[in-house]
Amino acid sequence: MTTANANTPSALPNTGRAFVKAVLSGDSVVLRGRPVNGPPPERILSFANIVAPRLGTAADPSKEEAGAFESREFLRKLLIGKEVAFKVEYTTTTNNRDFGSLTLAPPGVEGETNVARLLVKNGWVKVKAADGKRAPSDEQTALFELEAAAQVGSLGVWSPKITAREVSFSVTDGRAILDAHKGKPLDGIVDQVRDANTIRVVITIPSATDASKKLHQYINVNLTGIKAPVYRVNAPNIEDLIEPFSQEAKYFVESRLLQRDVSVVLEGVTPNGTFNASLIHKVGGSIAEALLMEGYASVVSWQAAMVSGGADKLKAAEAKAKEKKLRLWKSFVAKPVGAKGASLTDYDAIVTRINGADSISVVPVSKPNSPERKLFLASVRGPPKGESLESGYNHEAKEYLRQRLIGKTVHVAIDFVKPKEGNFDERDCATITLGETNISEALIARGLATALKHRKDDDNRAHNYDALLVAEDKAIKATKGIHSDKEPPIYRMVDASESATKAKSFLSALQRNKTVSGVVEFASSGSRFKVWLPSQNIKITLVLGGVRTPKAARQNPNGKEGAEKSEPFGQEALDFANRRALQRDVEVSIESIDKVGGFIGSLHVPAAGAAPSTVPGAGTRSASTENFAVLLLEHGFATVHDYSASQSPQGSQLYAAEKRAQDKRTGIWSIRDPVEEARAKEAAAAASIGHDDESKEVVKEVYVSEIGNAGEIHIQTIGPDLDRLEKVMADFASYHKNSHSSLSTGPKVNDIISGKFTADDQWYRARVREFQPDTKTYLVTFIDYGNSEPLPLSRLRALPPQFNTQHLPAQSREARLAFLTVPASGEEGGDAAYDRLREDMEGRKLVARVVGGGRTATDAVHVVLSVPAKEGGSSSSAASGGELLNLSLVADGVAYLDRAVVKQHEENVRNAGAGPKSLKKEILAGLVLAQEAARKSRVSCHFVCFNSVQH
């Protein structure tokens, strides 16, 4: 029941005119005056001489008397909102209750303006008996006569058919009421307005015991889709709260809806039984729209979609208030269209990645080349990861999202943006729909996620939050997923690439299966992947055979590019791998393993636009697939690795794909000339093979002074000049200690100068190799030792004439291991190859046979290195030497022979009788045999080099 507000003084006089604010019962009303600088004064007035049947209360519903509701309804429909004349006749001393009369404006009802007489005449009240101390007044006599007539006519409470209504003041099962009546207009009466957003309503619904009868159900309602200022006063155990405009907003609603007939549309229910609903007055329309139009409320986006008929009208009403800067929006400043930082909030997108059980990444359909957008499912919390990354239901939730979303076009509706907090960056929280399926709702309904429990004042939530709660309630009742009493599932996956030994134990089984279904979980480069094989319950590192891809930049933990920069088209290759292969159902074929446990083979991904087909144990995959190595080559994101491609059954496909990219000059071939590269390969092979004149071959004892990348070495020839080097360098250091001459201008490439080595801060002779404009440094090579480093101009000086190369030739010469290709750093096996070269060469006196190269002073010589006969234990391996290091590197799979070199050997075999045999040809033949043996045995890491890719 509504009572006069405790904060409002009863300032109405004893007589006058007022509006009927509320009807408490068939014999009591609340009057209010006109507002003056704030809420109007109020007064409760009971009718003198009459008494109406008592209404039940929430504390004691059984007190409800027959005809009580009908009595109040008669008076409510007669008076509510009308202006009347009132007169207080007396006030009781016991409870300070005012009694008096109300008079309607002429002509009244059927000529009667006295409200009490109208009540008696229609039988809805009884006349109080005279106290016997004095004679009845004329008014009492008239009332008795009217009452007698009503009794004779069996009117109102005098009817034998009148009974007490069935009424419920509390909600025992709000969900059942919502399910039965959601979205359907129900007849209702506004009983109380607590504030502009929280209203108590009595609705009429079928009785639970007898559907032919009506139940008067009292419910608490929050207006759906809006938030109005809070007005909370004298609430038990809660601090008072009066927000700006809350009193005005409350009065706005009371003056229009209190005790008016409304249409109630139920749209949601909270766990405590409070309903979200729209209240529609037959004249004034939606009260929510009216509040928004006047600037008394704002739209709550997460709820707005629940409104029957959509949220467009609410948003339009709010927009008008903003435009006029009304009340709540008095300081509103519209954001300019296209302002910097503005982002899409409602768009279609392609799902590119599943980040977790409640997070995905997408690329807008309208901007396919834009960066990925990371999204979090609004108001959803995925299962915890647990001790294992794939434990519990976390793995199942991610798999559910992956199988249904990856590569699909979905609709994204941004519900809110969660600001940066602590270590967490700003987050876009969205509702994702695939066709008609709400992904959050489907995930929760399967017990694979829960709905976040938001604070009551937290409006940052999913716009279909109510539906998420319903889905969770059903999942709990059905004990699905995380709500089950059973132990959560455990997914223990073996990392088959943990080591070469472990990889070898799985190799035979994977080779026998020809093709194995899997899921790409991670791409570290365009041709290196982490793949989960469900049928084997293992994860493998897969390296694509037959191709090389450029390096992509390494990322630091803070997400920024690290010191290792991307090679041309390295990032594009990685992006292509993520776009076409990441988290797709794929097929892999395994050929071999490398030295560190990687599996070398091929990867087949779903063909673009192919229809999916279900595969047991691997979700869904396309009915047709494409070789991913071929796709990389066709787009110019990779090059063919000659040796491994020539050994592959798919070699012809790889060469054909590369040729198509070269013809189109796409990708890598847009900056590289395939014709020039082919010529360079032939020239390098010819230089490596050299000539056949044994008399021109040079054999000498050397030290390897520097070991660089991809088998690049520098050698020092042992002899008198090397013995002089130490004395010359001492004099060189002394000279620079006493001289401070510096270069006034930058040196040119190939100039011989003095350079101050960073490691020991000493001066040495150096050759300028190139100028690096980004860092304004000069890359130099120290000509007596072979090591290189970039130096600023301040650490360079002119070379004194007495120390030039005419007085002492450069003591270090660049060299390459003849016939061999050594993996570079960053390629599979590159680091292992570097360590092996150091182990075999550092600090050892070796024999070098120069078999090619060295046409100019700066051109690398091609050498066959061997251990001196006395150290190697054999003198038959080569003249003046024992164990051939070139041969042992090939036999152990550390290096391999390039395709052009093998072709030259084949030509030598065909022309075997055309000329004398040479030691060089014998060495080459031995290398070819060693490579074939290593390839066939598969016990070494030979295929690392043959099939290497770059990270």
Image: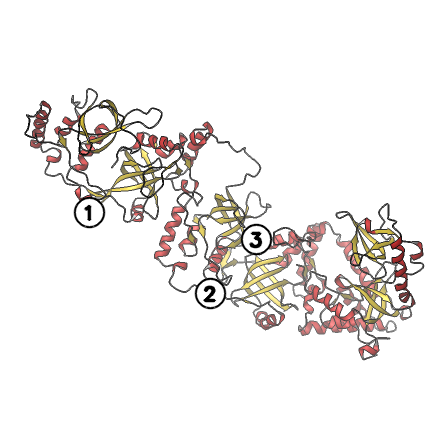
Q: Is residue 151 above or below residue 215?
A: above
Residue 606 visible in the shown view: yes
Disc 3/disc 1 C-alpha distance (Å): 61 Å
Q: How is the image coloured?
A: secondary structure
Q: Which residue is mark 1?
A: 210
Query: Which residue is label 3 attached to?
Result: 608
Q: Amino acid at mark 3?
A: Ala
The answer to whether residue 294 is above or below residue 735 is above
What's the amino acid at mark 1? Asp
Q: Quadrant of residue 514?
A: bottom right
Q: CA distance from mark 2 to mark 3?
A: 34 Å
Determine which residue is flagged by label 2.
490
Q: Are marks 2 and 1 in contact (CB under 8 Å)?
A: no
Other-residue count near label 1 (Cα within 10 Å), few / some / many at <14 / 14–19 / ≥20: few
Q: Residues within 10 Å of mark 3 (few under 14, many from 20)?
A: few
Task: Identify the secondary structure beneath mark 1.
Answer: loop
**In this orientation, which residue lies closer to the viewer: 60 or 178?**
60
Q: Measuring 37% from the left and 33% from the top, which residue is drawn there?
A: 246
